[in-house]
Amino acid sequence: MDRVNYFYDLPIYRVSSERFDQDWEKYLQDSLNMWPNEPKEKVDEFYKMEPELKKRFTKDAWQIFGGPWRYNEIIGYIRLHFLGDQIRGEYWLVKSKRIVKTRKKIIDFLSHKIVPEKTIPRDATNSEIYELIMAYIEEAKKYLRKWHVDSEDFEKIGKLIDWKSLINLQ
């Protein structure tokens, strides 16, 4: 039996960082506006006179909102690995009936593969192996289209890896 050779965990986010930033800006504006019937200009003028109060309210709102996106909005992972001459990705997701913004989560194993595996030809180059891995990731992104699979960091390093050597570590 072939040994599983894990090589990367791709995070799955509840929302993209752009959407998170938009939601945060709206939440912050709503939180800072203690006088909903007053014009925005008057509220802005108040905070110009009281910058420390605005700073404190912003810090409190950030904590209530949930903190930074990168680690707090993760709802699961795709654990990429080689199994023999195949590229696969285990599927891990929060254990919840509905995926909502939360700070209490348990990530649980869902499946041995999120999408069908890709077979690596024996004579594949490092570049071809990388392209197969990226094709697998793109299929996983389509499958999880309502969430955000973050492959940005993997894409930065993926072209630099000696995939043939990594596969042969099995």
Image (tube, grey):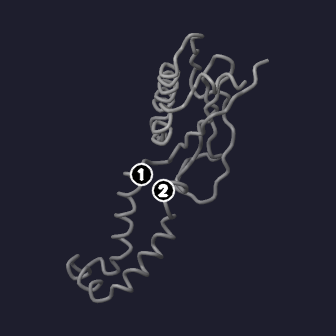
Seen from the viewer's position, the closer of residues 153 and 25 is 153
- What residue is at 60 percent from the left and 10 percent from the top? 122
**Residue flagged by tag 1: what amino acid is it?**
Ser
Outermost residue toward the bottom in this view: 49
Q: Position of residue 35 (x, y in %)?
A: 31, 81
Quadrant in which residue 7 is drawn: top right
**Image mark count:** 2
**Residue 82 pos. (x, y %):** 65, 25
Q: Secondary structure at mark 1?
A: helix
Left or right: residue 103 versus residue 152 is right
**CB under 8 Å between discs 2 and 1:** yes
Disc 2 versus disc 1: distance between alpha carbons?
6 Å
Name the residue at 42% across, 51% down. Answer: 17
Tell me the kind of residue under disc 2. Trp
Q: Count neighbours of disc 2 (C-alpha within 10 A) and say few if under 14, some if 14 to 19, many if 20 or more.
A: some
Label 2 element class: helix
Please state the horizontal and vertical placement of residue 13, each as a whole percent of the image: 51, 46
Mark 1 Cα-neighbour bin, 10 Å: few <14, some 14–19, many ≥20: some
Q: Residue at x 30, y 83 (%)?
A: 47
Residue wearing tag 1: 17
Image vertical order of residue 91 relative to residue 33, above or below: above
Observer-nearest of 59 and 170:
170
> Residue at label 2?
69
Quadrant including the C terminus: top right
- As rendered, which of 71 and 24 lies closer to the eye? 71
Location of the N terminus (image quadrant): top right
Q: Report whether 88 appears left or right of 66.
A: right
Q: Is residue 72 above or below residue 149?
A: below
